[in-house]
Image (cartoon, rainbow, N blue to C red):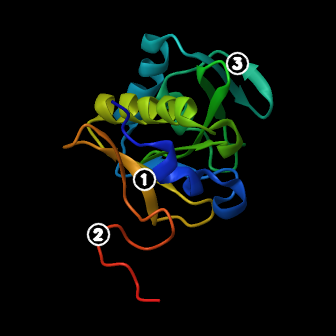
Amino acid sequence: MADLLWDDVRCLFDPDLMGSLPDVRVPHASMEDWQAVLDLVVDKGWRCQYSEGGVVLPAPRAEAVLSRPADAECPELRVWPTADVLAIFRFHAEDEVDFDVDLRELQGQDRLDVLCGFLGDIGRRLGKPVLMDREGDYGHPVLGYDVEADRVVLLAHPHGRDSHGPAPRT
């Protein structure tokens, strides 16, 4: 059974409403969590490409990436969980695993299932929630992997109101 149904979350995947590149993150992360993500990419056999300053290089250990000088260009790891869905990890800080997905690639139930599976794989490996915020609206997740439920759940009503509170009166 699908974690989420496309008809229930379609508006959360509208690039005009959400921005095309929502922020996905694992808060309260560590160097070990970053390494676990790098290991997961290898274990799952996902196609990936690591680069620094536009130069493609072999993926290093997390410690090497995260110990770069503060003024160095931010490295990125492009990961394709399927041939047509891309996640771009950026190594901004040790304490948060963060990446972008492109909503234009995530249209329909099949692609939603790919995203939910990807978030679930990361969340299970780290034993931590994986949260997705609207582009530029950091700290207000709309959906995410819930560790206790072991699935991706809605964290905000698709039309903007909090899923845990009553609907506003109109």
Q: Tell me which residue sits at (62%, 50%) in the image.
A: 70
Dot 1 alpha-carbon crowd within 10 angstroms: few under 14, some 14 to 19, many 20 or more: many
Q: Cβ–Cβ below 8 Å for labels 3 and 2?
A: no
At which x and y percent is residue 138? 52, 64
Dot 3 alpha-carbon crowd within 10 angstroms: few under 14, some 14 to 19, many 20 or more: few
When the figure is inspected, residue 32 is found, relative to residue 159, above or below; the finding is above
Q: Is residue 14 left or right of residue 93?
A: right
118 or 32, which lies in front?
118
Which amino acid, by three-letter code, is at mark 1?
Leu
At which x and y percent is residue 151? 30, 38
SS at badge 1 = strand
Q: Tell me which residue sits at (42%, 12%) in the image.
A: 43
Camera-near label (1 vs 3) is 1
At which x and y percent is residue 140? 46, 66
Q: Tell me which residue sits at (29%, 69%) in the image.
A: 164
Res 82 → quadrant: top right
Q: Earlier in the sequence, mark 1 or mark 3?
A: 3
Which amino acid, by three-letter code, is at mark 2?
His
Spot the residue most to the bottom: 170
Which amino acid, by three-letter code, is at mark 3?
Leu
Residue 143's label in the rendered image is: 1
Residue 79's label in the rendered image is: none
SS at badge 3 = strand
Camera-near label (3 vs 2) is 2
Residue 57's label in the rendered image is: 3
Mark 2, residue position: 164
94 or 46, which lies in front?
46
Q: Cβ–Cβ below 8 Å for labels 1 and 3?
A: no
Q: Tell me which residue sits at (71%, 42%) in the image.
A: 104
Dot 2 alpha-carbon crowd within 10 angstroms: few under 14, some 14 to 19, many 20 or more: few
Give how far apart the Cα atoms at labels 3 and 2 are. 45 Å
Image quarter in which the N terminus is found: top left
